[in-house]
Amino acid sequence: MAVTLFKDTTYNLMNLIDDIRRGEIGLPEIQRPFVWPASKVRDLFDSMYKGFPVGYLLFWFTGAEMGSRQIGTDAKETVPRLMIVDGQQRLTSLFAVLTGTPIVTKHYTESRIRIAFRPDDARFEVTDAAIERDPEFIADITQVWRSYRDTTRGYFARLKQHREEVDRAEEDRLDDAIDRLKDLAHYPFKAVELDSAVDEERVAEIFVRINSEGVTLNQADFILTLMSVWWDKGRRQLEEFSRAATQPSPRGPSPFNHFIQPSPDQLLRVAVGLAFRRGRLQHVYSLLRGKDLETGVVSPERRDEQFAVLRDAQESVLDLTNWHEFLKCLTRAGFRSSRMISSENALLYTYALWLVGRRDFGVDLPRLRDVIARWFFMAHTTGRYTTSPESQIEGDLNRLRDLNPGDASGFCERLDREVATAFTNDYWAISLPNRLDTAAAKSPALLAYWAALNLLDAELLFATTKVSTLLDPGVTPIRNIERHHLFPKQYLESIGITGATRTNQIANMAFVDWADNTAISSRAPSHYWPEMSTRLSGERLKLHCYWHALPVGWEQLTYEEFLDRRRHLIARVIRDAFPNAAPPFGIRGSPGRDSDANQGADRRW
């Protein structure tokens, strides 16, 4: 006979609510962004009222001994006996409605879930202003469980003012409908309770097999759930940081920034990288449970030790001084806002490396800023953390393992060596131009070019306005026409070149003031360039041609020739601007390495 990993249990709804209140069942989601729309909560109550099944709950025994306390909390909160693996949104909905507890919205504001009920036809609705005024509805069914008698009396009083007459038979029918609603407190829920000996991989498999919505669990979900059990304060800190990062604080420093609004699981990955020098979370869950990875023995003492390591690392991750010092590195690399970030993984894993360098190797801030700026520029441009990101960052962290603590120079040299390995001459001459052969609006290669223009303090073509002004996170253009087609779309269509993938090529776009864009209209380059280039003379014309990667005589080239030559020149600009670079990486500032920026570049490519 097969050994079962679970037991079947039936709860009634009010027992579930009481267990959540007492902390027997951990329901941390009541304090976290609630993802269900109110209409889905309405449908849940409608199904229960009609006696329909509403799915299994999946619980997992924590293995905590009676009276166990959480780690690192002054109040020494009790560890829940059961963790919720599947059914969090349903239980959050039911708990919030039956108890009137506010939920946290996706915008991190508190809000009540208010569901209305019309006894006449047993109809549930999401409460709105019209329903509030409609005496046929009980506008907030929470009141049925808070004060049943007062709620029914108030309902019938309003109804009798609205209707000319409510006879005894009608009143009894409506009263029965409300009583049936109240009895939902005894609605039965089937729960599968998994043994504490079941590991997280098996739990994930069970979850997928019984979950009809195709949702998958990842390792971060398990670690965050484990934190809810043993160190809920730590999980709350991650969530509070994420919440505070969404908008500026009027009361002082906050994690708000223009690059990223990190989620708790993203911050967790940074903390894990710093604490355990791991990118793959596969074994971290076991470590935090206190399991010896060699013997398989679980020890409460080992669990406490590992949580202490994570707690110290998380403190560094959430330190506002560290956070904002790191963000300066992105600016140092030429990046200004989320508009220029195509890989949040690159940002977060680079933050983990910044923390390792600062905390474990003692790199001073000015030097660390330059090293990390180079690293982020490389990682973001090459897509280092796009494929198998966990394995990649773990490999990057492993390269630092043999260094002695405090070896600042060794840390910096290791990172710069990897940058040099990625940014070879072949990368600049072949790989990067090939990556520019796209019309993707958020291509890493395109964003590297924008960063380069920021670093070179470039101006818009034909204008004195800085490119950095357009890329300022505080600027929201009325029309997205700062980027102009050098070969206008209508002109290309007139010569038989159509389709966004061809006309919107990166190499066909340049930053131009909207008024100049209007003046250019649909004219061919050979028509508008001689006229508009007369605004610029001497060195400024050379600078504009260099910044905007315009080959000499480009207006006379065929479209395909122009695209090919400009891709190589854009790659050249990116290489020259590479942040704080010294040979062999590149130089900053003036046009290229040749005496004439464009002629020299054309000869080279």
Image (cartoon, rainbow, N blue to C red):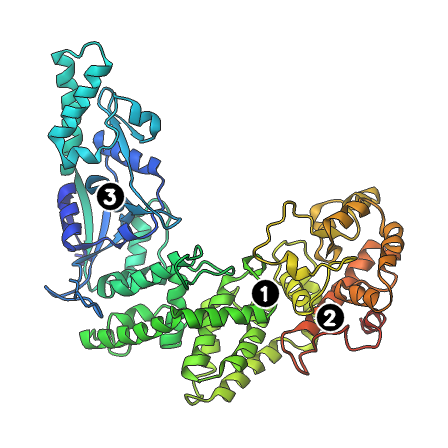
Asked if residue 199 can be seen in this view, the reply is no
Residue drawn where x is 80% and y is 46% of the image: 519
Q: Name the kind of residue labelled 3 in the image.
A: Ala
Instruction: Name the residue that disc number 1 marks.
Output: 335
Element under disc 2: helix
Instruction: Name the residue that disc number 3 marks.
Output: 96
Instruction: Name the residue that disc number 2 marks.
Output: 572
Q: Which residue lies furthest to the top in this view?
A: 164
Q: In which quarter of the image is residue 305?
A: bottom left
Element under disc 3: helix
Q: In which quarter of the image is residue 511?
A: bottom right
Q: Real-space Cα distance between discs 2 and 3?
A: 58 Å
Choose the circle earlier in sequence order: 1 or 2. 1
Q: Relative to residue 463, is residue 84 drawn left or right?
A: left
Q: Quadrant of residue 546?
A: bottom right
**Of 134 and 116, the residue lying toward us:** 134
Q: Real-space Cα distance between discs 1 and 2?
A: 18 Å
Neighbours of disc 2 within 10 Å: few (<14), some (14-19), many (20+) = many
Q: Are discs 1 and 2 less than 8 Å apart at CB?
A: no
Q: Tell me the quarter of the image containing the C terminus.
A: bottom right
